Image (cartoon, rainbow, N blue to C red):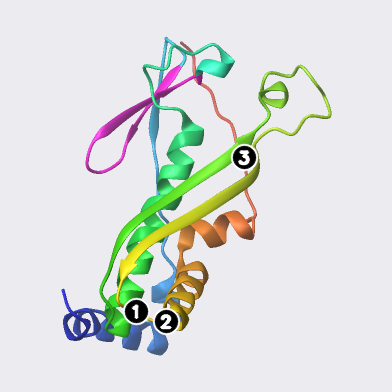
């Protein structure tokens, strides 16, 4: 896909959202199935991923860790966003993107009440191969950071509502 093709695809959407901002609001969904072996299968739309405990919390390592999945979502979103921005800028970029995050499993396991539950730091690293100038790369990374949905969600926590329901077994 080149810049003109991407712009042609996005132009009617941008026009529609400018005319009727309500059409730009979409609710994304993820659904999983709880399993008896302390796992949850998540339909990703392309494959079924079975999530379970990380080995640091008693898992075998044979199932996907939800923390890894969060970092994988960040990498996927940042990578797609960067490619889209590069196309729009007329730049050719290849390479890799990595995310790593720090966790203290004492919090997750309830060992230390003051230990945080969740990531305390996440680092996103782009290793790019490109003929773009350093200034263009800086702009590319900046725009990727600005428009990456997962990165922005992590950086600016949304309001989250948790509900529960039950039915007889």
The boundaries of the magenta stretch are 39-54
Which residue corresponds to mark 3?
162
| Alpha carbon separation for disc pair 3 and 2 | 42 Å
Residue 107: percent from the left, percent from the top? 72, 26
- The answer to whether the residues at label 2 and label 1 have Cβ atoms under 8 Å apart is yes
- The answer to whether the residues at label 3 and label 2 have Cβ atoms under 8 Å apart is no
Q: Residue at x 64, y 60 (%)?
A: 156
Q: Residue at x 48, y 42 (%)?
A: 70
Count of numbered marks: 3
Which residue corresponds to mark 1?
132
- The answer to whether the residues at label 1 and label 3 have Cβ atoms under 8 Å apart is no
Residue 69: percent from the left, percent from the top? 43, 38
- Closest to the observer, 16 or 38: 38
- Closest to the observer, 104 or 94: 94
| Alpha carbon separation for disc pair 1 and 3 | 45 Å
Magenta stretch contains residue 78: no
Label 1, residues with CA under 10 Å away: few <14, some 14-19, many ≥20: some
Label 3, residues with CA under 10 Å away: few <14, some 14-19, many ≥20: few
Kindly report the secondary structure that dominates the magenta region of the rendered protein: strand
Q: Residue at x 51, y 67 (%)?
A: 145
């Amino acid at each position: 896909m080149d810049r003109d093709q991407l712009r042609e695809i996005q132009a009617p959407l941008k026009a529609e959202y400018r005319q009727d901002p309500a059409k730009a609001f979409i609710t994304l969904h993820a659904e999983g199935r709880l399993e008896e072996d302390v796992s949850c299968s998540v339909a990703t739309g392309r494959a079924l991923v079975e999530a379970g405990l990380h080995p640091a919390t008693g898992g075998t390592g044979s199932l996907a860790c939800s923390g890894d999945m969060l970092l994988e979502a960040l990498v996927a979103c940042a990578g797609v966003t960067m490619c889209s921005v590069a196309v729009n800028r007329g730049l050719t970029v290849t390479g890799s993107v990595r995310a790593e995050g720090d966790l203290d499993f004492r919090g997750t396991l309830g060992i230390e009440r003051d230990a945080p539950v969740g990531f305390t730091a996440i680092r996103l690293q782009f290793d790019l191969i490109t003929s773009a100038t350093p200034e263009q790369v800086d702009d590319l990374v900046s725009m990727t950071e600005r428009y990456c949905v997962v990165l922005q969600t992590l950086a600016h926590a949304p309001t989250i509502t948790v509900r529960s329901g039950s039915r007889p077994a």
